Image (cartoon, rainbow, N blue to C red):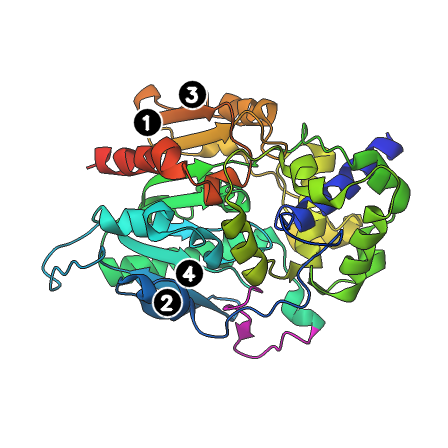
Amino acid sequence: MALQGSISFTALTLFLVLTTLPHEPHASSRGSFGRNIHPPVSGLCSSSVIVHGYECQEHQVTTNDGFILSLQRIPEGRGKSSGGRTRKQPVIIQHGVLVDGMTWLLNCPEQDLPLILADNGFDVWIANSRGTRFSRRHISLDPSSPAFWNWSWDELVSYDLPAIFSYVFSQTGQKINYVGHSLGTLIALASFSEGTLVNQLKSAALLSPIAYLSHMNTALGVIAAKSFVGEVTTLFGLAEFNPKGLPVDAFLKSLCAYPGIDCYDLMTALTGKNCCLNSSTVDLFLMNEPQSTSTKNMVHLAQTVRRGVLTKFNYVRPDYNIMHYGEIFPPIYNLSNIPHDLPLFISYGGRDALSDARDVENLLDKLKFHDEDKLSVQFIEDYAHADYVMGFNAKDLVYNTVVSFFNHQG
């Protein structure tokens, strides 16, 4: 059991780092992790939206625990203006771990989900989680302080999503549609189960959901376990987990040097064989990602793999858990508590090594009492994890269906 736990923990650590590190098709050396690539310092609106002819506004929202989050609003389609007379349905788009809102805007405008939604008459809001490039501010803490990084995805559930939803609701006066990918699905499901967002929520589209990770299977699990079997806190400390930093970079390069491991295949080994990524999109991705998260967040996700259930962060020591939760074990997020009449769209891929089909089926089992006419499920045999965000054919296979789903809610 101990060995299995170590493999699962290490495999998760790797996948969280490397899901955001596609291979460079034209690189001349193995293991290029983008440390010398500098992303644009301008805001997301000016760098990736306005340049394509769309109106875009930069907003910020402060969470109840003091983090200042960046939001981008695309209120209109390209070349369209309602003059403020038309009430459009708002949509919040939430990225996964170790990336930010830029990850939705790497293809041409006709293939990017936020712009497709805007062109179809939606009022689009792109979220950027705490710790990422445009959300590295706090009312009193500095990113150089370990206290700035003392959070896991529990805080995304308890603070980030509620703050974003409340702000968008206050700006639009309408219930909100939601799109999440990867970690963006996990924090949404946990939030819905606690009833914190449902009064402001209209419907949700969940792409590559990772609520359960028991069957996550990576080709590098055994190799990684031999290379790194200690707790991640021992290596990186309880602060920032920066994929571009020297400790993580050195660890990844050590794996690249292992006999039989080809770093060009790391993304395939860890995310599944993505069918539909253009090399130009991957190059642009490497110019802008990955982003930092907290080490505590990494540990919390690893706990999800080990236990096979969704719980709040486990401090391991009973006295610490009692101090935080009033009980020895961390509370469970009970997904069966999600309102049965909440419209949900779930899409998952047959080649996804992270959102494994068996784990998605486990999620669907938790939703077995959901109203039949409120749950739509799509399965795409050839899709893996990154295809849902950067696939050149995602518009035809996924996004048009998302648009139809949202429109169907009235």
Above or below, 316 against 323 in this view is above
Residue 355, horizontal then vertical, whole percent: 58, 33
Q: Name the residue under label 4.
A: 163
Q: Which of marks 4 and 2 is nearer the N terminus?
A: 2
The 10 Å Cα crowd at callout 1, few under 14, some 14 to 19, many 20 or more, is some
Q: Does the magenta stretch include residue 138?
A: yes
Residue 340, horizontal then vertical, whole percent: 37, 28
**Whole-number angstrom distance, CA of label 1 to CA of label 2:** 34 Å
Q: In which quarter of the image is the C terminus?
A: top left
Q: Name the residue under label 1.
A: 374
**Whole-number angstrom distance, CA of label 1 to CA of label 4:** 26 Å
**Whole-number angstrom distance, CA of label 3 to CA of label 4:** 30 Å
Mark 1 near mark 2, Cβ–Cβ under 8 Å? no
Q: What element carries label 1?
A: helix
Judge left or right: residue 84 versus residue 347: left
What range of the chain is rendered magenta? 131-145
Foreground of the two, 359 or 227 = 227
Q: Residue 45 carries which label?
A: 2
The 10 Å Cα crowd at callout 2, few under 14, some 14 to 19, many 20 or more, is some
Q: Earlier in the sequence, mark 3 or mark 4?
A: 4
At a point 46% along the width and 20% down the height, the residue shown is: 368
Q: Residue 369 carries which label?
A: 3
The 10 Å Cα crowd at callout 4, few under 14, some 14 to 19, many 20 or more, is many
Could you tell me the amino acid type at mark 2?
A: Cys
Could you tell me the amino acid type at mark 3?
A: Phe
Q: In which quarter of the view is residue 42 placed? A: bottom left
For discs 3 and 1, the disc positioned in front in the rendered view: 1
Q: What element carries label 4?
A: helix
Q: Which of marks 1 and 2 is nearer the N terminus?
A: 2
Q: Which of marks 3 and 1 is nearer the N terminus?
A: 3
Could you tell me the amino acid type at mark 4?
A: Ala
At a point 85% along the width and 57% down the height, the residue shown is: 234
